[in-house]
Image: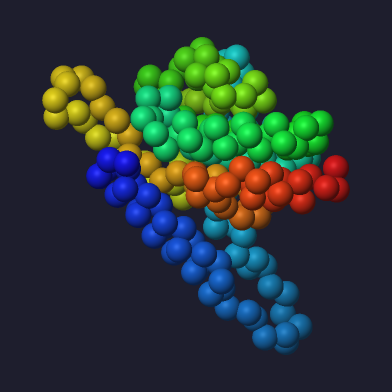
Amino acid sequence: MTVRAILITVIGLLAGAVAALIFVSRPQLPSTGQQSTSTGQALIGGPFSLTSTAGETVTEKTYLGRPMLVYFGFTHCPDICPSGLQIIAAAIDSLGANASKFTPLFITLDPERDTGPKLAEYLKSFHSRIVGLTGSPEAIAAATKAYRVYAKKVVSETTAGDYTVDHSGFMYLMDARGKFVTHFPHNVGAETLAAALTTATADF
Ligand code: NI
């Protein structure tokens, strides 16, 4: 791991801890008959309007009706994204026919370079079922914000015009109504992920 990769992992873990803390520490309203609207699950996820690798506009509504596994990254990522995508691919394979009961999404954090065709070509090497989404920088920024993903463009100090994107690397499991269920680190075990996906898709 590079220093940067370690830093990203630490930032990611901290972000996860904060998210978990917020989730756990949501005050339980006393049962005074008052209806609570706070579930703690609205913190991660939300509306997005992005572009499929085929150039079609898609929104969160496109994928309603079955669980989603949402993962953000970019095709130039040296290690975190590929390892996470390999784990997602392994989990898809271990689900067999049930893999069609959820949608694995890979949303780019680098819309400047990750065009639809580029993204499609990249994802093909991991698994044909992984759906790549790109969009305008504004649309990607909105999706990133909705999922509380940390992402920052870092210009190369050695190669003119080159840059990388520092980012957190969580996978977000959303239910069939688009509500947050749980998240996994990018290096979650494929068996752990497959088990969670099996549970999530059991009712379908
Ligand atoms: Ni990455």
Vertical side of 134 occupied by 152: above or below: below
Percent x, y of residue 148: 46, 50
Q: Residue at x 51, y 38 (%)?
A: 84
Residue 99 visible to an observer of this rendering: yes
In this picture, residue 80 sits left or right of residue 44: left
Residue at 65%, 55% (x, y): give it: 181
| Residue 171 in the image: above or below residue 100 | below
**Residue 155 screen position, x and y as percent:** 21, 30
Identify which residue, 87 or 21, lies in the foreground.
87
**Residue 60 placement: quadrant:** top right
Query: Who is closer to the viewer here, 89 or 153?
Result: 89
Q: Is residue 137 visible?
A: no
Q: Residue at x 62, y 31 (%)?
A: 89
Q: Position of residue 125 (x, y in %)?
A: 55, 19
Quadrant of the image containing the C terminus: top right
Disc count in the image? Answer: 0
**Looking at the picture, does residue 156 appear above or below residue 91?**
above
Left-right relation of 80 to 48: left
Quadrant (top left, top right, bottom left, bottom right) of the N terminus: top left
Which color scheme is applied? rainbow
Residue located at (17% from left, 21% from top): 159
Image quadrant in which you'd find residue 166:
top left
Vertical comparison of 43 with 160: above or below: below
Q: Nearer the viewer, residue 121 or 84?
A: 84
Q: Position of residue 144 (x, y in %)?
A: 46, 41
